[in-house]
Image: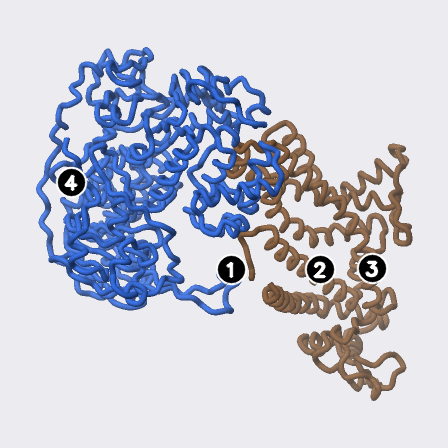
Chain colours: A blue, B brown
Amino acid sequence: MSQTPDHEGPILEIDSLSISFFTRLREIPAVMDFSVEVQPGEAVGLVGESGCGKSTVALGVMQDLGVNGRIVGGSIKFKGRDLGKMSAEELRDIRGNEIAMIYQEPMASLNPAMKIGKQLMEVPMIHEKVSEKEAYQRALEVVRDVKLPDPERILKSFPHQLSGGQQQRIVIAMALMANPSLLILDEPTTALDVTVEAAVVELVKELGRKYGTSMLFISHNLGLVLETCDRICVMYSGEAVETGSIKDVFDKMQHPYTQALFRSIPLPGADKNARPLVAIPGNFPLPHERPPGCNFGPRCDYFQDGRCNQDIAIPMEPITGDDRHFTRCLRYKEIDWHAPIKAAKQTAATEKGDVILKMDNLKKYYEVAANALFGASGATKVVKANETLTFEARESETLAIVGESGCGKSTFAKVLMGLETATDGQILLDNKNIEHIPIQSRDTKTVADIQMVFQNPFDTLNPSMTVGRQIMRALEIFGHGKSDDDRHKEMMRLLDLVKLPREFADRMPRQLSGGQKQRVGIARAFAGGARIVVADEPVSALDVSVQAAVTDLLMEIQREKKTTLLFISHDLSIVRYLSDRVMVMYLGHVVELGTTEQVFSPPYHPYTEALLSAVPIADTHVEKKHIVLEGDVPSAMNPPPGCPFQTRCRWKSQVPGNLCETEVPPVRMLAEGHQVKCHLADDILARMEPVIKIAAE
Amino acid sequence: MGKFILRRIGVMILTALCLTFIVFFLTNLYPNLEKFAKTQGNFRMSDEEVATFLNNRGYLQPTVTKYGQWLGVLPGYVIEGTDGKVRARCAAPNQPIEEAPRFCGVLQGNWGFSTTIKEDVGGIILEKLGLTGILMFWVMLLMVPSALILGVLAGMREGSRLDRSLSTFSISTTATPEYVSGVLFIAIFASSAVGLKWFKGTATSAMDNVTFENFFLPVLTIAAYGMGYIARMTRASMAEVMTSQYIRTARLKGVSFPNIVMKHALRNALIAPFTVIMLQFPWLLNGVVIVETLFNYKGFGWTLVLAAGNNDIELLLGVSVISVFVVLVTQLISDIGYVYLNPRISVS
């Protein structure tokens, strides 16, 4: 049961692989003519939007495609042996032993009814037939390797007793138990917070170096791939469109899709007014509706009729002069890759109007029973979800609220919407107090004034009602129009506003793509002429190329309607791109508040600094200071005394005495409109260096 | 944990009180009492005579009072009848009124007197419960393991031929009521119609001495019905678990298929069916009535039919109370077992 002896040459060789899924109706090709090589010790990133086939490739390598999936062409060789020709037993020996996989959702991929220790120990016990005692020792060692505190206790716990970051570390530990030669990481950090993500990525990189493991890193996040990989392979609609070293692909891209992808993500320097994002037009083709010729053709700026849409397969062409750099484009030699971005529509910054929303010392505490399930008796605990929130929002301003999960940003949105009432403090909408009025007793005007765009467009539309009907229903509730005819006209106007074709009115939500659904969600929010729109991570569930379009739409409507946008997000790149002011929250406290410029440049609050450093940026010219936060966000049920951030702060030693541990820092004004909650002395704050530096070209 | 159980027991007692009151109320409706009076006195009583008869024996008191007396929280009635005789609820036959205890209800262990069997209800119930317990034990022993095995086998490869055939089997057993399957079994295995004559068509002799021959058919009849249902639930739960991500994790860890099923899937898949198995107890009581009557096995179900058929109010009440308790106790066990199986739920 030992591992295959050392093998010269690539660890993994995928050669013109094609995978199809068979349904009753038709064969659906998921991956076509896909080739990639992973050399020993190399990390290869697989990038693409959802549905492009990147996870299918991973499952193909594992030979675990389910009943409907089948490899219809090409081969996958692992250390020179064809995986497709192996017997079930041989495959079992390789799985978990020589190829290990790390998954997207750590909670779902751990067995809920089995102790962590047992799940870990299983791996060497199966593959190396070691004794239970030895396996336990190994498990302890690996858990220590992935830097989890108190390994003995962790081995004895069930998965639900750990936090998301800890669970992901356990999944990584499980993959490392057998010291595999190839590690497949399928979106390993998508479900995690940015600071946790940064720590996990750091760990993976370090372990990769330590054990010399080759990696296949699947992600939709270009920045993350830049940080972790040596080579990259960009996929589009089942095909690899460009592959090469990170440097070549990021700096000298040779495929229009790669270019379009980079132009649609907010990099430092992008600005909503001066340099807006360029969204990729059109939609991702469904697997059975691919166009003839180049798959990207219909959405490509360089499309040439009669050439790009000829019904022939386009081969991967090597780029001369580069190391193993290939592109699947017929016109790559003709395109001027250095041409500046076609002047996208520039707009003037909007004038900020009067203050329409004011929060003053807002507090929201929850009382939870210590025993949630069988409740009633026992002491109750207080969760301080929001502590002394004070800020103002002006007309046509975008205020971003940033923080990790559990920082209280969603609670704040709920209190503002009236889904919860405040414990203390006030919310003034046009100088009227609304903090104590639950939504059912608010008048129609107030309800229509404050609307919300939700994170997940897939769950927020009623699946059994047409799109038009749902918007009309919203209009009806807001008392708009006298007759159904009026409302129908208004609904059509709203569809125009969110740039959806009018015939979508009769469609069912399931016939729409994610981006289109989110547009419907936006149309619904604006149905009553909302003046304040709370957008709770409106684009985080969408693909990169769609994100830009939806963000632009929001900006455009805001310009037209002078809406105040409260943009809740954990994605600092997008926040930097579109917001005027930023509010950083941690454990219910506002730790920093200021204009985007002020927050994104020093002096920072230590938490903001760490947050900025954690965000992966897909630009090879950017140099980042490396700050990794240790540990998890403390529980809001049991927050640390004094400064909420003191348990993870790297600047703590710079504060004299035990001030950080005893006193909540006061709000300090650093500049006009820039406030932080920190004990650090002025001179130390002034000495802080910028986290992100753009190297000279 | 202790606190949780105590609270559940509290809720249980409350439920039991409500349910027994409903049964008490229904059995004590006037037409029932009238029939009772006529069977106890004579069939030619006039309406007035019936009323006097009942009134003399305390039957016409308000229902709540009667219920309190039956339960043993109110003092038993002492009524001087229109015929001049003083009757007390708590006095045994030929016992002077003065010596009778004040309270005599279920709580004091006095379950009343059966008019059909002519014995104390408490004693009858104890004996019958024992007999039915034996039957239940064998039913469970046959039903639960085979249902779980069927369900797990069917669910581990959803859509396979094995799954299809096992599912067809379990659907057909659940779809066949006991009075059909029981008669079929007797016709096939015990009568001269087919001529197999492997088993006995009656279980009367099993009351003294259980043998495979005299007991298998009633056990099979009840078990077949419940088995299909549990197997379906297990299959659904198993099929769902087998598609979950942690099973994929295990598979890609190199765990062999039998070990995936045994070590990774089984415990998770049993969480849902466990509650269903416990819910089967009340259903079994139901089946017991039919099967015991069919096979002439004089257990609890048989007694229920007897009591209902003969308007034996006290016996009927006793049987109902015990049924209610069986249902509630099994639910308590099910809740506790659920906590044990599912580590995500903790009560302490």
Report the side of B36 relative to A436 (left or right): right
x, y percent for residue B70: 73, 74
**Quadrant location, the N terminus of chain B:** bottom right
Q: Compare marks 1 and 4 and give the one earlier in the sequence.
A: 4
Asked if badge 3 and badge 4 are on a common chain, one would say: no
Structural distance between the alpha carbons of marks 3 and 4: 83 Å
Residue at screen point 60% across, 48% down = B271
Report the side of B166 relative to A87 (left or right): right
Residue B84 appears in view? no
Q: Which residue is mark 3?
A: B128
x, y percent for residue B287: 74, 50
Q: Amino acid at mark 4?
A: Lys
Report the side of B193 relative to A401 (left or right): right
Q: Compare marks 2 and 3 and give the one earlier in the sequence.
A: 3
**Mark 1 near mark 4, Cβ–Cβ under 8 Å?**
no
Q: Which residue is mark 1?
A: A373
Residue A418 appears in view? yes
Q: Amino acid at mark 1?
A: Leu
Report the side of B241 relative to A410 (left or right): right
Q: Which residue is mark 2?
A: B326
x, y percent for residue A249: 26, 25
Residue at disc 4, secondary structure: loop
Q: Amino acid at mark 3?
A: Lys
**Mark 2 near mark 3, Cβ–Cβ under 8 Å?**
no
Structural distance between the alpha carbons of marks 2 and 3: 14 Å
Q: Quadrant of residue B30?
A: bottom right
Residue A535 — which label? none
Structural distance between the alpha carbons of marks 2 and 4: 70 Å
Asked if badge 2 and badge 4 are on a common chain, one would say: no
Residue at disc 1, secondary structure: loop
Specify few, some or many for label 4: CA neighbours under 10 Å numbering under 14, 14-19, or 20 or more: many
Structural distance between the alpha carbons of marks 3 and 1: 39 Å
